[in-house]
Amino acid sequence: MVVSAHPEASRIGLEILRKGGNAYDAAVATGFALAVAFPVAGNIGGGGFLVYRKQDGEVGALDYREKAPKAASRDMYLDAQGNVIADASTLGHLAVGVPGAVDGMVAIHQKLGSLRWAQVIQPAIDLARKGVVLTEREASMLNGAKESFLKANKFIPNVVRDTPWQKGDVLPMPELARTLERIRDKGRVGFYEGETADLLVKEMKRGGGIISHQDLKEYQSVWRPVVTGTYRGYKVISMPPPSSGGIALLQLLQMVEPFDLGKWGWQQANTVHVMTEAQRRVYADRATYLGDPDFVQVPMASLLNPAYLKNRMVTFDMGKATPSTQVGAGQLVAKESDQTTHYSIVDQWGNAASITTTLNGGYGSKVVVEGAGFILNNEMDDFSAKPGVPNMFGLIGGEANAIAPGKRMLSSMTPTILEKDGKLFMVVGTPGGSTIITSVFQAILNVVDHGMSMQQAVAAPRFHHQWLPDRIEPEPAAISSQVRESLQKKGHTLQNRSNYGAVDGILKGKDGKWEGGADPRGDDTALGY
Ligand code: DON
């Protein structure tokens, strides 16, 4: 089964499974297909994370997160007065981190794949040659980004045209097809050296970017040990730093475990209250302690220590919200941006892949590499440009996540796998910036505590709290007016936000069959055989 953000990508992944490929062959094929069919987030110019569990129980994680270029520096987004320069880390060439996606796909295939490399990449090339038929949602996203594309590029890229895009239009991608062919024929060299690298570095020079040939050539993805914990008897396997996701998720689960959420009921006042109070404490930790483990020491064991987590909840009051000012400090406003993409795959043997990949914002930096046809990320914004100043997700950070040459920016991406009784139980993840962690958290609670199916769990309306700003942000349908009132009585502030995230998961159903859950908030599609 393949669940991804785009019907074409799910179809391509499924085709590979049907041909006898394993989950990792399908993961690579789906990854490249998303770069073509879902350019808002699918990519070769970005990065991501894989969490895998093989049929024999072996688990691991691949970090193919972008890195700061060598010429990057701590204050590169500050003006002479020390203020953050608007848009510098989000739009245009300077916002781009050294892409990790292609090295990631190569590493996944080498270690875990079984089909030939050319075989898993070819379907994406064919799709790029044919052109992608736009869904209504994609047409509107492209139209919405037109001005930014024109601002970020000195030429008119294929994603822009005079008349608005409409559902059913075909987006031609001949240059991307050629870039993918170079990757097909030469592997990582087809991207990090030679013609593609030349085009990328030329693009950088044209727009004042700083990625060099050496940055590209030296980029390496890293296999890392997963972080694991338990929740009500389930084993939870997730992404370690440089993502904050796995640690934060395990902290959240441990902090709410003593409470009988299932009995209290889904989205009832006490349930939401406890979850919120855990969330505010966890995001305060995130801002202080988490960063690239190759550069800063992340106190992982302490953060996951049961005594520490119990102690964090000592100030928890069942009747009253703890103001975030008493948990930490800072002031900020969250802005919305909604594009990254998650896909979940399980093959006939029970091998599982959980992958979240991103350009960061929708269409990343909006920079399209002229002649190479792919979009570059704006992942540099995931660093803390200045202590205490929020990034585009309203997240603040400090020293641990300051910019340094070659360092990876902190992420919230949380590709996750659950086991029950030593067997694969669930594969799950989502986009959504800072809301990724709380969305995965809720998808797990929806299944484990509230008995939902995978489809119900991904579709159920969600809420979010990230310490600062100090407010619960529910989707409009997430919390009833009665529950809102009782939360306000406890001292919570609530402010609706529009629907967010796109949780795609696979669950072992009660009948022993795999059930796919595709988030109805997007064009997400579950396909299996
Ligand atoms: O790594 C991260 O946490 C962010 N770059 C993810 C961005 C994201 O999810 C965008 N939107 N949905």
Image: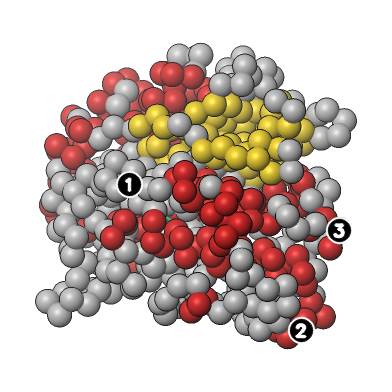
* Residue shown at 49% from the left, 58% from the top: 433
**Residue 330 as seen in the image, left or right of residue 90:** right
Choose mark 3 or mark 2, whichever is in front.
3
Q: CA distance from mark 1 to mark 3?
A: 40 Å
Residue 293: give x, y in percent of width and height.
34, 43
Are there few (<14), some (14-19), or many (20+) residues within 10 Å of tag 1? few
Residue 414: give x, y in percent of width and height.
53, 46
Q: Is residue 338 above or below residue 247?
A: below
- Any part of residue 431 in sight: no
Circle 1 residue: 297
Viewer-nearest residue: 359 or 289 = 289
Circle 2 residue: 485
* Residue shown at 68% from the left, 73% from the top: 317
User: Cβ(mark 2) to ligand 1 < 8 Å?
Assistant: no
Secondary structure found at label 1: loop
Q: Which of the labelled discs sits on residue 263, or is there none?
A: 3
- Any part of residue 232 in sight: yes
Amino acid at pointer 3: Lys
